[in-house]
Amino acid sequence: MSYNFDTTLDHRYDNSYRWVQPEGRDDFIGMGTADLDYECAPCIKEACRRVMEENTYNYRMRPDEYYDAICRFYKANYGLETDRSWFTHVPGTIVGIRIALSAFANKGDAVLMHSPAFGPLKATIELAGYRYVTNPLVYKDGRYEYDAEDFERKVRENNVKVFLLVNPHNPTGRAFTQAELESMVDICAANGVTIISDEVHSLVVFDGARHIPILAVSETARRISMQVISLSKGFNVMSIPHALYGIADPDLREKWMQEYLPYDFHYASNSYAIAVVTALLSGQADGWMAELTQYLKRNLDECLAFFSRDDIAGTAVVPEASFLVWVDLRDSGLDLDRLGAIFREEAGIDLNDGADFGPDGRGFVHINFAVTNAVLKEALSRMERVLKR
Ligand SMILES: Cc1ncc(COP(=O)(O)O)c(C=O)c1O
């Protein structure tokens, strides 16, 4: 490997949100929040260094290179021709999703999501005054499947206005297939539903799976959808927030712009974010991403081997993308109302309790395996204490 993922900052002492230590302790392992422990791709440092040396932070337009990099990214990775006019940005995906909800629905309207669901998105829907409706993914033989019949029924019965798709899906790790996405799109199109597709987990994809952006699904999808991506997850740039919103359809874009423009995000974006996004989307870190994916796959394989042992309770749901594994502990004999607390108290591991993802997440845990391989080994040996049958 040309990049070093084995040596990192000691995140217990760098204000990492994930690695916060409880009062009086310094031995907790942070495996919750979805960021990476690794140092970023070198081109990010280089892009930031140039901005810093200018030391000039005046109002800036987004340069041509920025848009060229975005269009290149879609063409190179998904064979999709895009146009710069499709793209706007907001510093952070969830803020933009909240703005999009007000562009495409009225207060009190129903917004549909697959469940289990990422808690902050549910909170965004409810706190902004919309009705949260779920289409549960069906868990069968260790895999989550999309239930088209239930989806269509929920859309019709609730007069759903927006479908908030998360693809690849958090927490289950599913990268939906073309057939699944076409089914969702066609049901939405037939019922006047707009799709907001949150694709922040799409940069790390494991062998055998493929990420299909909503804008690449079909002509119909391009007519009714907005795609949201950020580079935070895959390239670990949460502190340089910049989410991209892609809308191909001019009428849909017009509705979005009416809500978006008053927020004043359309020019003078953060210079660091523009420089970093341009570097990354122009392909300068593609080699880094390939090696990161390899490193994560090795960690994932170790997790899967651990959970496939007969003497260990729990079944891991194999993720097709990203760096989080969803583990079914419903038959473990542990107190399912205290799973997060049990891992903290008995193993010194801070992970996400599945109940945070709604009622159908109860009895599961969500583990971030984007730690160094040495930390992962230590974590698995501590988990053995909790999960040994
Ligand atoms: C599904 C989903 N959407 C959005 C976010 C937030 O992403 P960002 O930090 O790029 O705004 C997360 C973070 O975990 C997420 O899992």
Image (cartoon, helix red, strand yellow):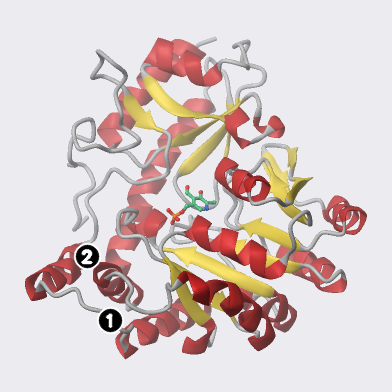
Name the residue tied to disc 1. Answer: 60
- Answer with left or right where residue 73 lies relative to residue 183: left
- Quadrant placement of the N terminus: bottom left
- Answer with left or right where residue 242 lies relative to residue 157: left
Name the one closer to the observer, 159 or 309. Answer: 159
Residue 196 visible in image: no
Name the residue tied to disc 2. Answer: 44
Residue located at (58% from left, 59% from top): 98
**Mark-to-mark CA distance, 2 and 1:** 19 Å
Residue 107: percent from left, percent from top: 74, 57
Q: Residues within 10 Å of mark 1 (few under 14, many from 20)?
A: few
Residue 377: percent from left, percent from top: 32, 27
Residue located at (61% from left, 11% from top): 335
The quadrant in which residue 116 appears is top right
Name the one closer to the observer, 199 or 322. Answer: 199
- Answer with left or right where residue 306 lies relative to residue 169: left
Q: Residues within 10 Å of mark 2 (few under 14, many from 20)?
A: many
Label 2: state its secondary structure.
helix
The quadrant in which residue 72 appears is bottom left
Q: Is residue 113 above or below residue 251?
A: above
Q: Is residue 381 above or below residue 192?
A: above
Residue located at (61% from left, 22% from top): 329
Three-letter amino acid code of the residue under disc 1: Arg
Residue 87 visible in image: yes
Q: Is residue 26 above or below residue 125?
A: above
Residue located at (56% from left, 44% from top): 120
Three-letter amino acid code of the residue under disc 2: Ile
**For discs 2 and 1, the disc positioned in front in the rendered view:** 1
Residue 314: percent from left, percent from top: 58, 23
